[in-house]
Amino acid sequence: MPNPEEYDLVVLGSGEAGKYLGWTLAAQGRRAVVVERRYVGGSCPNIACLPSKNFIHSAEVASFLRRGKEFGVPAEEGPVDMAAVRARKRAMVAGLVDVHLGKYRASGAELVMGQGRFIAPRTLEVMLNDGGTRTLRGTNVVISTGSRAAVDATPGLRESAPLTHVEALELDRVPGHLIVLGGGFAGLELAQAFRRFGSRVTVVERNAALIALEDVDVSTAMSELFADEGIAVSTGTVVERVVGRSGHGVRLHCRRAGTELVLEGTDLLVASGRLPNTEGIGLEVAGVELDERGIVRVNERLQTTAPGVWAVGDCAGSPYFTHVALDDFRVVRDNLTGRNRVTTGRLVPFCLFTDPELARVGMSEREAQQRGVRYRLFKVPLSSVLRARALGETRGFLKALVEADGDRILGFTAFGARAGEVMTAVEMTMVAGLPYTALRDAILTHPTMTEGLFPLFSATPAQVEGSER
């Protein structure tokens, strides 16, 4: 092994947590290097979160144009220029990459573009994209390799060359009939977007309901939304075989309730889960153990089984959200500087960026009942929110769980316009340990969507006993 270059910190993968660790420690005068094989800044600014929201917003604008008569504006019924949609997305990505490169320059962190793998404890060999190799050793090493879309071993599925979100966001055409495998976050967001661009869309979900882990009223509301937008949904459906090739025509042989079902479309999008990027990077040489799912084993401080090696984000089994990876950065940063910070007990919010949005923080009713937690349920339709009426966007509801014998908020769910922003106000109340009455009695700006928290927490709650009843 050639003499390695010595660093205080070596990061494998430039995703959210990894890049912030590199920037932060370098700015503190440490010698830090980040190794990235392809996407400067990781998946979020290049192929995932931000590009998909850019894409979804274009679809929302297309929907508004078709609904123009509702607003007294002439409707636009022409075809969507997908090449222009893609160009807009690419321009945003290019700008974000420039921002990232600027942060590397400003912080003093080194960015090395190449394929890295462990060849010894805390030591990486990097096959440089421009040719040649480098050997890097760190006092501390952070694994930040992220995850990728899963394409399972269903006969014919891989041979059909299906789209994942990466390829879907690069299309310069509107698919004639897009079949989406998976009724989770990515599948639902892209299904609605392509429907609004003009595709016929069918969502195939093996569970009995869309977003099956959420409460029944949430799943029902999402199904009703899709039905109203003309999106076909086939739940409780298992794909047994795929014939054809995406983009040229595919046929899915499925089984539903014991009956064979055949679905045909022009394009196939797989959005049925993710896999950690932990293969082929020499973790066994480094002494880093994986669990049965291929996820790096970490403790509550995000330490791996190898001394001086940490793991963050998707590859470490953290919830698959960029905002959680950012908190993983804080955990490792503090632990590297002598503090003791852990991942346990984190309050993790999420937002599904369909239109309208679904946002939740804390416990759902399903979770509370499974745990036997007694609670009071506050719930109002979105039509109770005056701003929603002004916008003409009254589909949905707000609901909150408050402890049965106190005023602490246990969870909040919003399905409606700007749900993510409304949720944030509730989350801050929960983080601060304030009672729900703080929101009920606050002076909330009129007319805003957040003002809807007043009618919500002024409603007469229903007492729910949980699963102990």
Image (tube, rainbow, N blue to C red):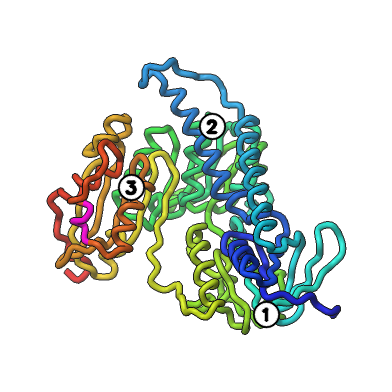
Q: Label 1 amino acid?
A: Thr
Q: Which residues are magenta?
A: 435-439
Q: In front of the other: label 3 or label 1?
A: 1
Q: Is 393 included in the stretch rendered in magenta? A: no
Report how far apart the C-alphas of labels 3 and 1 lie in the structure: 43 Å
| Label 3 vs 1, first from the N-terminus | 1
| Label 2 vs 1, first from the N-terminus | 1
**Is residue 399 shown left or right of residue 91?**
left
Name the quarter where the N terminus is drawn.
bottom right
Identify the residue shown where x is 66% and y is 63%: 13
Mark 3 is surrounded, within 10 Å at the Cα level, by few (under 14), some (14 to 19) or many (20 or more) other residues, namely many
Identify the residue shown where x is 53% and y is 33%: 58
Q: Secondary structure at mark 3?
A: helix
Q: In front of the other: label 2 or label 1?
A: 1
Q: Secondary structure at mark 1?
A: strand
Task: Determine contact: label 3, label 2, CB under 8 Å.
Answer: no
Give the residue pinned by disc 1.
139
Q: Position of residue 86 (x, y in %)?
A: 63, 35
Residue 422 is labelled as: 3
Report how far apart the C-alphas of labels 3 and 2 lie in the structure: 31 Å
Give the residue pinned by disc 2.
199
Mark 2 is surrounded, within 10 Å at the Cα level, by few (under 14), some (14 to 19) or many (20 or more) other residues, namely some
